[in-house]
Amino acid sequence: MGLSKTDLLFRKLVLTKFYTRGWGRPDVMKKIFEMHKLISNRETCSKLVSPNYEVVIDKEINFANYKLIHGHFITPLMDYLPKLVPVCAQVATFEVVINKSKVRSDSHGPACIHMAGTGDHGFQRRREMIAKPLLKSGITSVLLENPFYGTRKPKEQFRSGLLHVTDLFVMGGCLILEAQVLLHWLKRMGYGPLGVTGISMGGHMASLAGTNWPEPIAIVPCMSWTSSSVVWTEGVLSKAIPWRTLEMQYARNPEYEKEILNMLHHIDSYKLGMDFVTSKGVLKPKSERVSQEDDDNIPKKNTDTERRQQETVKFMKGVMDEITHLGNYSVPVDPSAATFVIAKDDAYFPQSSLTHMSQIWPGCEVREMNSGHVSGFLIHNSAFRSAIVDTFERLMKTDKHASAKKQSGEIKEENGLCHSKPANSVPVKSHNISSFAIALKAFMLKS
């Protein structure tokens, strides 16, 4: 498996930096980890959000064949960690894309929540690329705005560059609980079956949110995998991090190592340490180590410096695994209703050093595309849509309630779902597009 040259080129075109102010305060990180214990367990998480949580509809916009509904609600994380959520992010905003010809009085059919990927501010991109095409299959889409993005972005934040590592964790906590609010709301409105999806970071957020819904749910993460730790320690975004700043904060504040490190559940984290040291704990020669190639942000002067660097990177992998590794969350009620769509040459979300999802969620489906991350995002949206439709079909076939309705003739073609056999891989047409052209097009879309 090679890394996509387009991914590497695109990263050079985008100058956004992440975590420029460091880790975030140790006391904030500890509070997040304590909250994580509740959010990561389906039984406790289901008690954090009321089934009747208030959702406000702001306006409806009618078009020829579809309707848009805009709404908002207060993020439930405010009930538990109010001081950690920036004022600008406290109100969750969303947009619903509905096929007017499919709306029925007794049942509105399947509905899917779409999480935003890195740089996906607002709703337009998801609406045009995924949501509107899904209307042909009778699937209603709910587009949720990420905290720290769009109207929920802090003024001091540049583009998508989160200022602290803890900001990503606050974002995840908000999105998991906000998804619960929307799933309850959709259920009250008569939609079903329900699902969650997203691309890249949005895909991973969707997989986290899907673990805590107490019923079978369609989960379709696209171009994401077991843990986001690899994104920041192995993928090309690792070069967008000021490692020297993180290294200095980690070295100067003993709380990170003495207290927070002991709170981590090391699933895949120690694999990184094995890349740096021998079985006897001796630092390996540079030529034998697996690390970030040609990263000018990490100086490599002597053994002591290298040891501090690898400790910092290992800590990053540890905290990311703690909050984002799916092995630290409940297994979905029905993991066979999950479909992962991954890019074989993904340089943003590499999979090789992580536990395979088939071991984390036995029975889930994994589809592979012969592409990288950027090219997958730009030219393979049809593969993502097909996975969503197929997964909903699979879920409906195993849903006893839906089966009973089908047998009685209540549901025929109203849902309009396309019928195609689930596959282990997604057939993708080859596109004669240069790496530079793809990266340039991506630069115009993604910040």
Image (cartoon, rainbow, N blue to C red):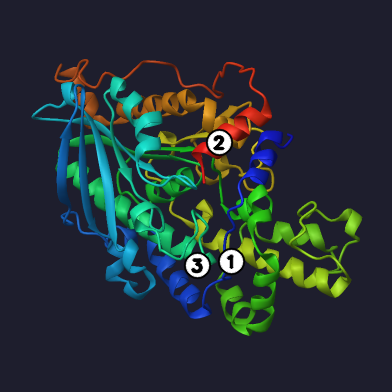
- Secondary structure at numbered mark 3: helix
Residue at 45%, 66% (x, y): give it.
156
Q: Nearer the viewer, residue 368 or 364?
A: 368
Left or right relative to 283: residue 325: left
Point out the tag, 1 or 3, that comes first from the N-terminus. 1
The disc placed on residue 20 is: 1
Dot 3 amino acid type: Thr
Q: Which mark is residue 442?
A: 2
Q: Amino acid at mark 1?
A: Thr
Q: Position of residue 53 (x, y in %)?
A: 18, 57
Lateral position of residue 441 relative to residue 38, left or right: right
Circle nearer the viewer, 1 or 3: 1
Instruction: Tell me, for residue 166, which label it has, or none.
Output: 3
Q: Residue 382, position in %: x, y?
A: 46, 23
How dense is the environment of label 1, judged by Cα within 10 Å: few (below 14), some, or many (20 and up)? some
Q: Please give left or right for residue 311 compared with residue 58 in the image.
A: right
Q: Residue at x 82, y 68 (%)?
A: 306
Residue 404 appears in the figure = yes
Q: Taking 373 as reference, is 303 above or below it?
A: below
What's the residue at 34%, 31% (across, down)? 131
Q: Is 292 displayed left or right of 438 in the figure?
A: right
Mark 2 and mark 3: Cα distance apart in space: 27 Å
Q: Quadrant of residue 171?
A: bottom left
How many residues crowd mark 2 within 10 Å: few (<14), some (14–19), many (20+)? many
**Mark 1 falls on what kind of element?**
loop
Screen quadrant of the N terminus: top right
- Percent across and percent down for residue 248 are 69, 76
